[in-house]
């Protein structure tokens, strides 16, 4: 292909390049645009279904709260209490039947204080059975007003009403993608039930009033949601939206239609949704095969009073309706892009033809100087644009000849000057950065001294005065002495920060590193952040002494240990190990945590002042830089080694003391 291009004219090459660039760009743009359109439309559909499911849940919960409110309102009135107190059961039965009709409940019943049924408005002859085993009845017997969704077995439905038992009976229909089952019919019912205690004036519980609706083959909720959310919208004579209530994985109330346009009662949810929602208790949002078509779907579990999953609430929208919208948008986009492509090619051809025609006439003249020989010039025979181009070209060649000699002479000189100046600028920049860091650190240190030293001084004075007033055998004396000691240490820490920023020399003494480590651990290992951290101590027995400022070294160890606990998110293992390197005459202290490690791209920055990986407000980035400065002033070394996802090890090396 490239050999063919070499033989073509400049005009043909430019046109081909334009076509290739625009073609590739057009295809790439169309592909990316199609993906964006697809994602936008499908995400919009998923977002809508998510909000539709929340609306469905709101309607569902409002219906449940309505039953709860109505049952509780009737239970709180004095009529039932009066009838029970007078043992006027006949008037009570008439009253309860009227309540059921007024509220419009499928069933309404009354129990005594032991949970035994006194009367059923829908089945007056079914009395005396004990319902205290039902969680909602038991809760009401304990004084609570309860509303929940429950699964009633056929036996309980029969006691409430034979008609309810018949309504609950649903034959299972073989459904594609559903999990295998040997079950052929469902006789249990999913009911919305509310229960309220009957309480007399002495606050004694006389019984429980309970009632509710059977959801099997009850389409009031799903149709209400369908009208509210989808407003009867259709796609090619099919309802776009569907709403379903499931008992376990069985559709008991739905406006999903079968192929013969009947409600899909008795069909079942797919095995994938069953596992996600009913088994794992998760909400499920994705495309799902519903009876006989694909829907963009949202499912969430329905739980009973004991928080067991007994059903599913579902909202879905026909996927092919949104696919049709997506395809129309993409085709429109591609059509507009194609017209634009043709128009640009036409314009490109006209522009290319205008440019290449005069240039073709100059090709033969310029071939003599294409080798880089600046001694050749273009012969100018005209004063038009081409002639002006030739004159400009000759002037350029003369200038190039002159400039080439000057550039060759200045090249070496300039290279040396640039190199020298670059080194100066780099040194100056490093100095400015270091100065700014130290200035910021000094300013912060002054602020810390101003804000902390005053209250610390007050704490130290007051605690010292209190200590003087305590007797030697006072049990609080040791605690107060510890307060004084730690207050003094806090004061020394602030001084240490100021010394770091001002390059103050530490107060040296011969100390034992193991003792400093143990003192540091005794201060922090009982804190809450170390409750879930296992600290392993591997201290060398024949460790030599070092010459160091004990307070500053304790500050260093404290910083490293606290950083380790934060890196492990307050749970894990921290290993402290000491050893003596005879070859370098150095005492070596290592701190190894089991955290997630440090990323390679930032490990070289962790000792820089003000560098921190913590969220804003959670760290100043001074801890490790102060620690590094203290170790350096002790003629020591501080380094870090980390394996991402495994551990981080900080190593501190201090010169061993020549005397003990």
Image: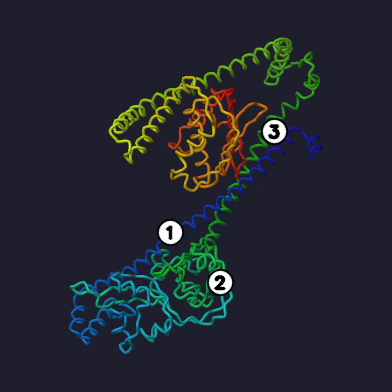
Asked if disc 3 and disc 1 are in contact, CB closer than 8 Å, the reply is no
- Mark 3 to mark 1 CA distance (whole Å): 58 Å
Quadrant containing the N terminus in the rendered view:
top right
Look at the numbered disc 1 and give the secondary structure of its residue.
helix
> Which-is-in-front pick, marks 3 and 2?
2
Image-based side of 202 in relation to 540, left or right: left
- Circles 3 and 2 in contact, beta carbons < 8 Å: no
- Percent coordinates x, y for residue 586 in the rendering: 62, 28
Which is nearer the N-term, disc 3 or disc 2?
2
Residue sitting at 35 percent across and 28 percent down?
A: 451
Circle 3 residues within 10 Å: few <14, some 14–19, many ≥20: some
Mark 1 Cα within 10 Å, few/some/many (few <14, many 20+)? some
Residue at the far front: name it. Answer: 473
Query: Going from the N terminus, do you reach mark 2 or mark 1 first?
Result: 1
> Which residue is denoted by mark 2 in the rendering?
292
Mark 2 Cα-neighbour bin, 10 Å: few <14, some 14–19, many ≥20: few
In front: label 2 or label 1: 1
When asked about the image quadrant of residue 138, the answer is bottom left
Alpha-carbon distance for marks 3 and 2? 60 Å
* Gap between marks 2 and 1 measured at Cα: 24 Å
Q: Which residue is mark 3?
A: 353
- Where in the figure is residue 631, as x and y percent of width and height? 54, 26
Residue sticking out furthest to the bottom: 125
């Amino acid at each position: 292909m490239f050999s063919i291009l070499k033989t073509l004219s400049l005009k043909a090459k430019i046109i081909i390049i334009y076509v290739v660039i625009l073609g590739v760009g057009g295809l790439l743009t169309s592909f990316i645009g199609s993906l964006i359109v697809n994602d936008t439309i499908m995400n919009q559909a998923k977002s809508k279904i998510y909000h539709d499911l929340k609306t469905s849940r709101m309607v569902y919960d409002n219906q449940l709260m309505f039953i709860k409110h109505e049952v509780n309102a009737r239970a709180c009135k004095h009529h039932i209490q009066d009838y029970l107190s007078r043992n006027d059961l006949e008037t009570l039965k008439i009253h309860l039947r009227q309540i059921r009709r007024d509220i419009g409940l499928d069933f309404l019943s009354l129990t005594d204080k032991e949970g035994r049924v006194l009367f059923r408005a829908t089945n007056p002859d079914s009395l005396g059975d004990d319902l205290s085993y039902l969680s909602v009845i038991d809760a009401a017997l304990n004084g609570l007003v309860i509303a929940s969704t429950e699964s009633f077995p056929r036996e309980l439905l029969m006691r409430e009403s034979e008609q309810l038992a018949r309504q609950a009976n649903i034959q299972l229909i073989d459904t594609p993608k559903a999990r295998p089952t040997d079950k052929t019919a469902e006789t249990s019912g999913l009911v919305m039930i509310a229960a309220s205690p009957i309480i007399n004036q002495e606050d004694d519980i006389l019984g429980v009033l309970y009632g509710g609706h059977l959801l099997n083959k009850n389409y009031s909720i799903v149709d209400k949601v369908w009208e509210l959310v989808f407003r009867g919208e259709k796609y090619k004579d099919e309802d776009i939206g569907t709403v379903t209530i499931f008992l376990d994985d069985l559709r008991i109330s739905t406006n999903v239609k079968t192929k013969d346009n009947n409600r899909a009662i008795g069909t079942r949810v797919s095995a994938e949704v069953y596992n996600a929602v009913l088994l794992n208790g998760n909400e499920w949002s994705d495309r799902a095969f519903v009876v006989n078509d694909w829907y963009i779907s949202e499912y969430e579990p329905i739980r009973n009073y004991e928080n067991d999953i007994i059903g599913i609430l579902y909202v879905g929208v026909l996927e092919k309706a949104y696919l049709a919208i997506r395809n129309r948008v993409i085709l429109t986009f591609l059509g507009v892009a194609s017209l634009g492509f043709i128009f640009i090619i036409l314009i490109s051809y006209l522009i290319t033809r205008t440019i290449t025609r005069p240039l073709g006439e100059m090709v033969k003249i310029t071939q003599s100087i294409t080798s880089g020989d600046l001694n050749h010039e273009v012969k100018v025979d005209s004063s038009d644009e081409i002639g002006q181009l030739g004159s400009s070209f000759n002037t350029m060649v003369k200038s190039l000849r002159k400039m080439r000699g000057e550039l060759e002479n200045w090249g070496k000189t300039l290279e040396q000057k640039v190199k020298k100046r670059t080194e100066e600028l780099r040194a100056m920049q490093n100095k400015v950065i270091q100065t700014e860091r130290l200035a910021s650190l000094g300013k912060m240190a002054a602020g810390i001294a101003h804000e902390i030293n005053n209250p610390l001084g007050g704490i130290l004075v007051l605690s010292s005065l209190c200590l003087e007033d305590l007797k030697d055998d006072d049990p609080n004396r040791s605690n107060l002495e510890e307060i004084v000691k730690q207050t003094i240490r806090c004061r020394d820490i602030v001084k240490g920060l100021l010394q770091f920023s001002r390059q103050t020399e530490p107060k040296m003494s011969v100390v034992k590193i193991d003792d400093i480590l143990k003192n540091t651990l005794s201060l922090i290992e009982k804190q809450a952040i170390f409750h879930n951290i296992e600290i392993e101590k591997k201290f060398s027995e024949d460790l030599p002494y070092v010459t160091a400022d004990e307070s500053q070294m304790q500050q260093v160890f404290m910083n490293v240990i606290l950083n380790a606990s934060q890196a492990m998110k307050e749970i894990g293992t921290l290993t402290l190990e000491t050893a003596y390197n005879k070859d370098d005459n150095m005492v070596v202290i290592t701190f190894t945590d089991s955290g997630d490690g440090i990323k390679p791209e930032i490990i070289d920055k962790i000792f820089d002042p003000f560098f921190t990986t913590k969220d804003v407000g959670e760290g100043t980035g001074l801890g490790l830089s102060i620690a590094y400065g203290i170790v350096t002033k002790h003629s020591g070394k501080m380094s870090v080694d980390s394996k991402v996802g495994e551990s981080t090890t900080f190593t501190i090396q201090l010169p061993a003391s020549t005397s003990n």
